């Protein structure tokens, strides 16, 4: 009788331990399943976060004030820079700026190394063969500039002299169009600063430049003067490689429209150009 009681007790204990073990295993399985589910949720959320804001590479000029230039802190500022920043904020896209110089900036877009270019770029028929342009964001023009004490007061005074121009610009195109008529030699530069300096030192008798650019430089102390009336020029536009980045171009146009409606566009212009 005693042996039966002991055996019964052992059997009960064995069943209790077995149930406990099964319970622990089941709990571990449920915990593992829950952890796996949580891990999957985290991955999905991360993926969603990564597919949000679009980011582009935007090429620009180096010295083309008041459209793009460096302030005293080394920060890139100007009409183009402020417009691009405001439009990107309005449309919700990000960008990395590449400061390359005008010629290199347009080549970067043509070769696919950059998505767009904003660099005081005139909208011309020739350029429209390679680029798709935004709506115009500024109407420009070309002027001739000379040293303050220069005897040159008209295009006729350029005969037999050297004229400084910047490659790839509207000033270059205009100078080229009248070079034969007024019999002058064109000296070509890659940036505006070197072009201005060539006139100041007397190596070139004059230079041709977009009027807001040279006008701003003169107000900042550049020792040149403008003796002639402004020649009607083209409008400036943001550009992408032809047939590509249509979404970026649309966002620029939509953002520009919003900035004009809100008054922000005129506020940016007034910061750099006083009419």
Image: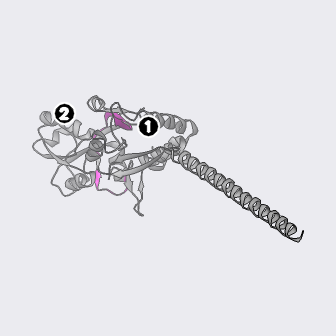
Foreground disc of the pair 2, 1: 1
Q: How crowded is mark 1: few (under 14 residues within 10 Å), some or many (20 or more)?
A: many
On residue 232, the disc is: none
Q: How crowded is mark 2: few (under 14 residues within 10 Å), some or many (20 or more)?
A: few
Instruction: Please give the range of residues in magenta.
Output: 219-241
228 magenta-colored: yes
Foreground of the two, 180 or 121: 121
Question: Residue 171 falls in which quadrant of the image?
Answer: top left
Give the x, y percent position of residue 31.
67, 56
Q: Quadrant of the C terminus?
A: top left
On residue 177, the disc is: 2
**Circle 2/circle 1 CB separation < 8 Å:** no
Give the x, y percent position of residue 206.
21, 47
Q: How is the image coloured?
A: one colour
Give the x, y percent position of residue 35.
63, 55
Give the x, y percent position of residue 180.
12, 34
Residue hosting label 1: 248
Foreground of the two, 51 or 41: 41
Tell me how far mark 2 sits from mark 1, CA to CA.
34 Å
Residue 227 is at least partly visible in this image? no
- 221 lies left or right of 28: left
The extreme left residue here reads: 160
253 magenta-colored: no
Q: Establish if 47 lies above or below 231.
A: below
Foreground of the two, 41 or 52: 41
Q: Quadrant of the N terminus?
A: bottom right
């Amino acid at each position: 009788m005693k042996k039966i009681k002991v055996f019964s007790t052992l059997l009960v204990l064995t069943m209790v331990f077995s149930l406990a073990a099964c319970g622990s295993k089941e709990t571990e399985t449920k915990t593992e399943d829950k952890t796996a589910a949580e891990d999957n949720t985290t991955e999905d959320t991360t993926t969603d976060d990564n597919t949000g804001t679009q980011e582009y590479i935007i090429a620009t000029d180096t010295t083309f004030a008041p459209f793009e230039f460096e302030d005293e802190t080394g920060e890139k500022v100007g009409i183009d820079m402020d417009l691009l920043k405001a439009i990107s904020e309005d449309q919700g896209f990000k960008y990395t700026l590449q400061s390359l110089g005008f010629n290199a900036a347009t080549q970067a877009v043509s070769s696919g190394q950059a998505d767009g270019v904003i660099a005081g770029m005139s909208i011309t028929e020739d350029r429209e063969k390679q680029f798709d342009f935004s709506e115009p964001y500024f109407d420009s023009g070309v002027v001739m500039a000379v040293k303050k004490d220069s005897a040159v007061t008209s295009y006729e005074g350029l005969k037999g002299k050297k004229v400084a121009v910047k490659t790839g610009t509207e000033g270059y195109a205009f100078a080229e169009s009248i070079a034969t008529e007024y019999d002058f030699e064109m000296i070509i530069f890659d940036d505006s600063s070197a072009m201005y300096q060539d006139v100041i030192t007397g190596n070139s008798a004059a230079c041709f430049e977009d009027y807001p650019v040279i006008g701003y430089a003169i107000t900042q102390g550049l020792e040149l003067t403008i003796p002639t009336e402004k020649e009607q020029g083209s409008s400036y536009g943001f550009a992408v490689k032809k047939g590509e980045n249509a979404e970026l171009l649309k966002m620029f146009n939509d953002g520009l429209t919003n900035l004009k409606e809100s008054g922000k566009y005129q506020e940016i212009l007034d910061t750099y150009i006083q009419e």
